[in-house]
Image (cartoon, rainbow, N blue to C red):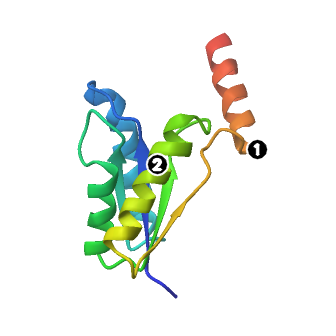
Amino acid sequence: MTPTALLLIAHGSRRPEANADLEHLGAVLRDRGEFIHVQPAYLELCEPSIVAGGELCVVAGAGRVVLLPYFLSAGVHVVEDLAAARDELARRSPNVTFTLAEPLGRHSLMIEIVLQRARQAMA
């Protein structure tokens, strides 16, 4: 089985509290041990960048890196910017497979999350 890393990608914010959500998610997934490396990365405003984060995955020994957009929809960032970052990583590390996952928005569990948040607000 190919050693696989997970590159979690968020937009990035000047507010550390906003970036802490991705760091928390990364830590939880890291503790589960499914991936040889879990690396948060940011499109802009924070470090590491997507390419730098992907390179950290390669250094950690990944033969495959899943780029997971922590975005709700496939807007310009996901369709163009993340695809460009994936292509740049593939160019830099041709022996590693880089796969761009779908954004979170259309997953069936999002309905339950939205309903739970709405119910919490009404309570």
Q: Distance between the residues labelled 1 and 2?
A: 23 Å
**Residue 117 in the image: above or below residue 63:** above
**SS class of the residue under badge 1?**
loop
- Residue type at mark 1? Ser
> Looking at the picture, how far across and down is residue 25, in whole percent?
43, 48
Q: Quadrant of the C terminus?
A: top right
Residue 112 position, x and y percent, is 73, 35
Q: How many marks?
A: 2
Taking the view exactly as shown, the residue that stands out farthest to the bottom is: 1
Looking at the rendered structure, the secondary structure element under dot 2 is helix
For the view shown, which residue lies furthest in the top direction?
Answer: 122
Q: Residues within 10 Å of mark 1 (few under 14, many from 20)?
A: few
Crowd rating for badge 2 (residues with CA inside 10 Å; few <14, some 14–19, many 20+): many
Q: Where is residue 108 in the image (x, y as percent from the top left)?
A: 76, 44
Label 1 sits on residue: 108
In this picture, residue 105 sits left or right of residue 32? right
The answer to whether residue 107 is left or right of residue 43 is right
Residue located at (32% from left, 28% from top): 13
* Label 1 with label 2: CB-CB less than 8 Å: no
Looking at the image, is mark 1 or mark 2 nearer the viewer? Answer: 2
Relative to 28, say whether 73 is above or below: above
Q: Report the residue marked by disc 2.
A: 82
The answer to whether residue 15 is above or below residue 56 is above
